[in-house]
Image: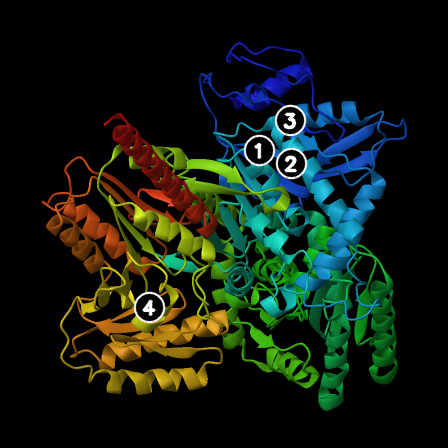
Amino acid sequence: MMSRSYTNLFELASGVPSSGFIRTGKKLSRVATVPGILSELDDEGFSTDTPSSVYQERMIIVANQLPLRVNKQPDGSWDFSWDEDSLLLQLRDGLGSDVEITYIGCLREEIDPKEQDDVAQTLLENFKCVPAFIPPELFTKFYHGFCKQHLWPVFHYMLPLSPDLGGRFDRSLWQAYVSVNKIFADKVMEVISPDEDFVWIHDYHLMVLPTFLRKRFNRVKLGFFLHSPFPSSEIYRTLPVRDDLLRALLNSDLIGFHTFDYARHFLSCCSRMLGLSYQSIRGYIGLEYYGRTVSIKILPVGIHLNQLRKVLDLPKTKLKVAELRSQFRGQTVLLGVDDMNIFKGISLKLLAYENLLTQHPEKRGKVVLVQIANPARGRGRDVLEVQSESHTTKERINRNFGGPGYEPVILIDNPLQFYERIAYYVVSECCLVTAVRDGMNLIPYEYVICRQGNAKLDETLGVIPSFPKKSMLVVSEFIGCSPSLSGAIRVNPWNIEAVAEAMDSALVFSETEKQMRHEKHYRYVSTHDVGYWARSFWQDLERSCRDHVRKRCWGVGFGLGFRVVALDPNFQKLSIERIVSAYKRTKKRAVLVDYDGTLTLNTSNSTGPSSEVIKVVNSLCRDPDNVVFVVSGKDRATLTKWFSLCKDLGVAAEHGYFLRENKDAEWETCVAVLDFYWKQIAEPVMKLYTETTDGSAIETKEGGLVWNYQYADPDFGSCQAKELLDHLESVLANEPVTVKSGQNKVEVTTQGINKGLVVDRLLTIMKQKNMVPDFVLCIRDDKSDEDMFEAITCAMAGPTLSPVAEVFACTVGTKPSKAKYFLEDTTEILRMLQALSAASELHSLKNISSGFQKVVIE
């Protein structure tokens, strides 16, 4: 049984209605074949109110190319068939037969616009594929332009240092990239049932697609997997559109990478460029992004075992193996299989092999390097240079070391059929994969399975079937599969001498050692196939999307800066109209406002409150029904200077250690402390970390010490902060102090000092004045301010707060909090306080007017 949205399209395409489903609302007349703005359709076109009789789970897989082979027949018609080599087709094994799969992507051949409608219907009916037809000029700019000239080189650590090395950034290519991603988004919208379907996007061609889908469907279940490397932040930050790409990816629910290194680089970029932090909870890495948790998945893709074993069983494979065995009789074969591009390191491999024959003359005539060079996927001068250098090096080696009947290097640069490549795997003693940078590279996995062979090939090779198999791998440190192949000889491909020695080691290892390494690799590769990878990704995607229904979502931002704010149903944005209404109704009010990050931006070099802040604070303080307190972590001397113009303002310094009711009152301490001898222990430790952490500083206060690393390197500063926290907790374990970490800081204070004390003191002062508050407003920014919310909650059950008091606990931003309300930033906070101030002034004017009228009457 197919899912509702797809069935609807299928019915329309075939003209045969289905009795199993009832649809209401607007229907799409047919599959759209030209770029359109389907996102402008109203919601009833995607209505999901009418449930289907039986719902079948569906995965929509989106990639640059559909997993189809396309051939044009002599009569002009098109012939389509599944591409068995496509990863997108192979991953179906991991999703199960009960999951319906719909593919969206481009075709490898250009289809005439007049034929596109018919082709789209054929693919939809027969293959459940929705083609995205991209105009040729746009596709050239998108694929050969932005993808291959900008993204692919940077992701492989190649910077455009000159026009010859990738070229300068071209804004028109970026616009083409965005346009194509928008076309793909419209295609997804044609078929998706957003409340039920899962969407899985593949690779760097479609990195901004998550934003378009999230903008249309806030709760879409969306996963993204990057099949290429992700560069370090020093390389990635050179992209002019770096922030746009990061924010677009963060609109996914799950982002997958082949290795921890790639994931670590991505997380570092998010930290350095977007200021986001991540955490690992029970083995899962997550990024908090506007109330949503974006999960990070680390799992290398596997190979399709069944397909490989079927090819191994083919008679023509057996014949090819026999042919190669005869050709290389008495010789040991080293094998390289690579695409012909600059990152595969073919030339470096040939130079290493040349060094092997030079340093080990006894290998001449006995060892052959077969290098299979697959046709390049890109185009340009760099491809031609690699081809030229490879052929030149091959000819030199054969000329210097070859002889009658012996050709040291066999370079095969014409396309081979899959079974022919398999045959080369079977007869090779060692496989060499020495790319200078590569995403995953499944060649070593294929090699291991082929070396395991089967009974028919054992007979052809003259091997006893029960005898342990053997294989050797020499792999580059810079490819994605390297960490999973613990038995391989890992090399730096740039070190030609080291690669040559690795080749020699692979040849001279004992048979037992080769068998042991092969067994280890075979056990891993055979259990971590493409089905395992797909199944694991989908399970994590389901887990990542579990909270979608529970949270309230709405979109904010424009263009590629769009994101979804997802909040707990009980956590809501504070309505200015609502709080002003409550403010007017109530008689006695307590207002507590955090200073740092609430009334002003949180910076270590703050110059004090603005004139607007002073004005609104004074206005609130003039209302006799209000008691206003500003709470800060700053020292009392600084706060005395900053708020010298606020006569009736209560101020709490150093997180509540010092407090005064108004300007004329004396400062008092909330906690009695006789001695601060512990500073002599803590300060030298902080100085040690300050000296070794550029950009950090110590802030000395009367009641505590703060180590601030706001201007240090984010990664190093965070690492040093964790070490400092452990160090201080250790040396101050028996002292009456509290060591805690905050936003870009580590702080040591006397035990018992927290901002909750300010709340208790404020409510006590008001009770003494017979002003039991029936309105409480508390606004905070940092984790240390959560104590104020706790104190208010406790007070609601006591005598210092009216049992019918209206309490507005508010935080700045949509971070997790004990508060019930939030406002976006300091601008919104100030606007809200100005609205309360205006209400007080209006009330004061009314009182004056009423008093004047009373005098006149009397």
Task: Measure the C-alpha gap from mark 1 to mark 4.
Answer: 51 Å
Picture quadrant where residue 126 is located: top right
**Residue wearing tag 2:** 185
Q: Which residue is mark 4?
A: 640
Report the front residue among 856 and 709.
Answer: 856
Using residue 524 as the reference point, say whether residue 463 is left or right of it: right
Label annotation for residue 216? 1
Q: Which is closer to the viewer, label 3 or label 2?
A: 3
The alpha-carbon separation of the residues under discs 4 and 3 comes to 56 Å
Q: Badge 1, how many Cα within 10 Å: few under 14, some, many 20+?
A: some
Mark 3 surroundings within 10 Å by alpha-carbon count, few (fewer than 14), some (14 through 19), many (20 or more): few
x 61%, y 50%: residue: 308
CA distance separating discs 3 and 2? 12 Å
User: Which callout, 4 or 2, points to the residue nearer the camera?
Assistant: 4
Which tag, 4 or 3, sits closer to the chain's start? Answer: 3
Q: Pointer 2: residues within 10 angstroms few (<14), some, or many (20+)?
A: many
Q: Which amino acid type is shown beneath numbered disc 3?
A: Glu
Question: Could you say where residue 465 lies in the image, as x and y percent from the top left?
Answer: 53, 60
Q: Are marks 4 and 2 in contact (CB under 8 Å)?
A: no
Residue positioned most to the left: 799
